[in-house]
Image (cartoon, rainbow, N blue to C red):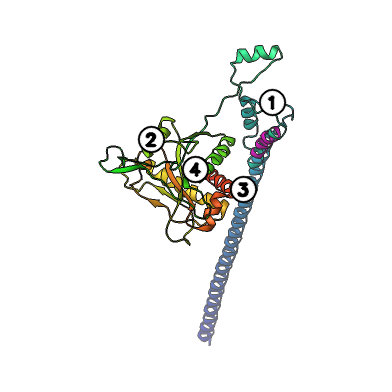
Amino acid sequence: MKNNSGRSSLSIAMVLVGVLILAAFGILIGMQAGNMTRQTAIEAELAEKKQYEEALAAAEREQAMKEAEEAAKAAAASQTPTPTPIPADKDMTAQELAAAAEAIKGVGTAGTSTVFAYADAQKNAGISLSLDTQPAEEAAAASAEGQVTPTPTPVPSRIVCLDPGHQAEEMTDTEPNGPGSSEMKQMVTSGAYGEYSGKNEYEIVLEIGLKLRDILVSRGYTVVMTRETDDVSISNVERAQMATTANADVFVRLHCNDVEEGEVAGVLCYGPASDNPYLTQDLILKSQELCELLRDNQCAVTGQKALNNLYQNDMTGINWATMPVSIVEMGFMSNETEDLLMASEEGQNQIAEGLANGIDAFFAG
């Protein structure tokens, strides 16, 4: 009985020890799990805090950049000068105009318009916009005497040579088609005749030529006429040489067209072909441009039809030219409407205005 009792006590003790061990293991596992949970929570909290701090820093940087940009704009605006209006009774010299332009530099389109407005206001008021070329000492002395007299610098005038084609008497002798050419052409032909107007081509082209001359002179051009009367004897080569002698910037030759078909009408120009052996490539291109502008601008004023220009190498007056050259066929005398248009006072004024506009456009290009 004693032995059994002792074994039972031992067994109970061992069971208790096992229970205690299991309990200890359970406590350890629980503690570890708790630690892991707390660690995960801490890491999540740290990550969220870092994300928040980064977002906050980005927002602060963006705000700082905006403030810096606004400060820069405010500083630029505070340094932008305000143009001072120019009194309406004041003459502006070139130096003063330059100073005014400098004062509004950076203001933009509005400022530029202000400078032009100053100039326009003076022009409309009849006040001169002078270019003062006096030396500083002379200007100071004159100012001290109360007698400042600006000396305007003249703008070089463009020289236009107008050649009203043909003449009262044709010239049947021949001359070279171009410099050094063995091909010979008649010096001057008789030209066309208008059955409806009863006028000769040489009469109409001179009448239009004189009107065109007056318009160009009124626009500031210097005009040289190869003839101002019908009773002359000037060959095509001589006409081109007259333009060269005058140092003309362009050579515009005025003609009228004529064909058998009376319904044909319109405006076209003759110019040098692209392979013209007598003119430089630059002169050829400029001559072709002149042809386009003369034709288009005449048609824009008169309402005539624009025909295809003809570029060829058999026109003596073109081949001997040393400046941009064009032969303008202003209309067909074989067409009743155009014959009467070119012979009328109103029609001639319109044609002259259109050709003057074409010359303006050429020099503006």
Does residue 330 lie above or below 226 as drawn?
A: below
What span is in magenta? 112-122
Residue farthest to the left, as pictured:
182
Please give left or right for residue 335 compared with residue 186 in the image.
right
Between the residue at mark 2 and the residue at mark 4, the CA separation in whole angstroms equals 25 Å
Q: Residue at x 58, y 20 (%)?
A: 133
The first of marks 2 and 3 along the sequence is: 3
Tell me which residue sits at (62%, 31%) in the image: 102
- Asked whether 365 or 326 is in front, the reply is 326
> According to the image, label 3 marks what residue?
61
> Do callouts 1 and 3 mark residues in contact (Cβ within 8 Å)?
no
Q: CA distance from mark 1 to mark 2?
A: 48 Å
Category of crowding for the residue at label 1, using alpha-carbon neighbours closer than 10 angstroms: few (below 14), some (14–19), many (at least 20): some
Between residue 74 and residue 58, name the one nearer to us: 74
Tags 2 and 3 touching, CB below 8 Å: no
The residue that mark 2 highlights is: 238
Kind of residue indicated by mark 1: Asp
**Which of the two labelled residues, at mark 4 and mark 3, occupies the earlier sequence position?**
3
Instruction: Tell me the number on the disc at residue 362.
Output: 4
Point out the frontmost of discs 1 and 2. Answer: 2
Q: Circle 3 — which element? A: helix
Sequence-earlier tag: 1 or 4:
1
Mark before the other along the chain sequence, 1 or 3: 3
- What amino acid type should be assigned to the residue bearing mark 2? Glu
Sequence-earlier tag: 2 or 4? 2
- Residue 284 is situated, as x and y percent measured from the top left of the image, at 38, 44
Vertical placement of residue 155 versus 360, above or below: above
Q: Which residue is mark 1?
A: 91
> What secondary structure is the magenta-colored segment mainly?
helix
Name the residue type under label 4.
Phe
